[in-house]
Image (tube, rainbow, N blue to C red):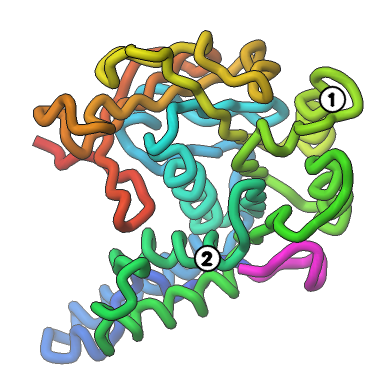
Amino acid sequence: MKQLPKGPSAREAASPSSGIARERDVQTTSPTAVHQAGLARDQMRETMTKSPEPGGILTGLSDFDALAGAMPRGLVTVVAARSSSGTTAFALGVARHNAEAGHQVIFASFEGGTDTIMSNLVAATTSVNVDRPLSINRGRRARIDDARAAMERSRLRMWSNQLKGGRWPFSNLSKDLTSLPDLDLLVMDGYGIASFQEPSDGATLTALHHLAQERNCAVLVTAHLVQNVGAPDTETPSLAELGVLDGAVAGVETILLLHRPDRDGNAPERRGEVDLIALRGWETTGTATVRFEPEYHRLADLPNT
């Protein structure tokens, strides 16, 4: 993983060794098994290094992808949720999944620095709670180091507005994107902050639409919902809850809502669950439920039964 705008314009493909069986792991098996493992390794390398097919911008969450299909290229997709519902974790997961699939991805944060982005990605990749450093033993540290090295080689680049000046935050990202001509997916975390003091109403959204169409890429942005006072967490969120700075995204064609019914512990039977609601613009609308693992900053498929 590299930071914008540093580095050359051509990026390396995702690490070909990820998830591949090593020969020393099968050395006690038959020669046929070793040969088959070698073929599987070669096939995996070919998959990780070949150019990605057009389209195919999926979330990486199997149940939701099977329901809703891919995010459209050339358009802006919005994921909106109340606070502490897993919005950033969802966005990071989409970015990581597509980089591993061979797509050129930028994760742009208006809510945190690049160190935080990297730490959260490492936690999601390794299943190590990096927020508890005293419990990280030698084995976990090795997993963290391997994950960091793999991300440095991947097609995922990170960007942060932290410490950047200017009146309109989004303009900083727009300028830096010119150094990266090839782009399949832009994930922008924090639409409301990005649009602050925009030169005209809706200028940020207009610029994102133009980028998506000009580059033929998918654009995913996160937006905040403000829960009505006194409303229970179990109540399904709606676009009517969009905050003032996020209101412009209400007209976007493709929208996904996240709902964490047990956010405040009022629905123990739904503990650890988040509903992904394909509201409109998807191949099929409906809801898929996933597991939220905040200690690893990720969402994951529920166990299949």
Side of 247 relative to 79 (left or right):
right
Task: Tell me the quadrant of the picture where the N terminus can be found.
Answer: bottom right
Residue beneath disc 1: 203
Q: Nearer the viewer, residue 253 or 23?
A: 253
Boundaries of the magenta span: 1-12
Q: Quadrant of residue 19?
A: bottom left
- Above or below for 162 versus 252: below
- The residue that appears at 17% across and 26% down in the rendered structure is 266
**In this rendering, position of residue 278 left or right of residue 216:** left
| Above/below status of 182 relative to 229 | below
Which image quadrant is residue 40 in? Answer: bottom left
Mark 1 vs mark 2, CA separation in Å: 30 Å
Dot 1, how many residues are within 10 Å of its Cα: few (below 14), some (14-19), or many (20+)? some
- Mark 2 is on which residue type? Met
Residue 246, x across and y down, in percent: 64, 23
Query: Dominant secondary structure of the magenta stretch?
Result: loop
At x 67% / y 27%, what residue is drawn? 76
Say what secondary structure mark 2 lies in: helix
Q: What kind of element bears circle 1?
A: helix
Whether the magenta-drawn stretch holds residue 284 is answered as no
Residue at (35%, 25%) from the top-left corner?
259
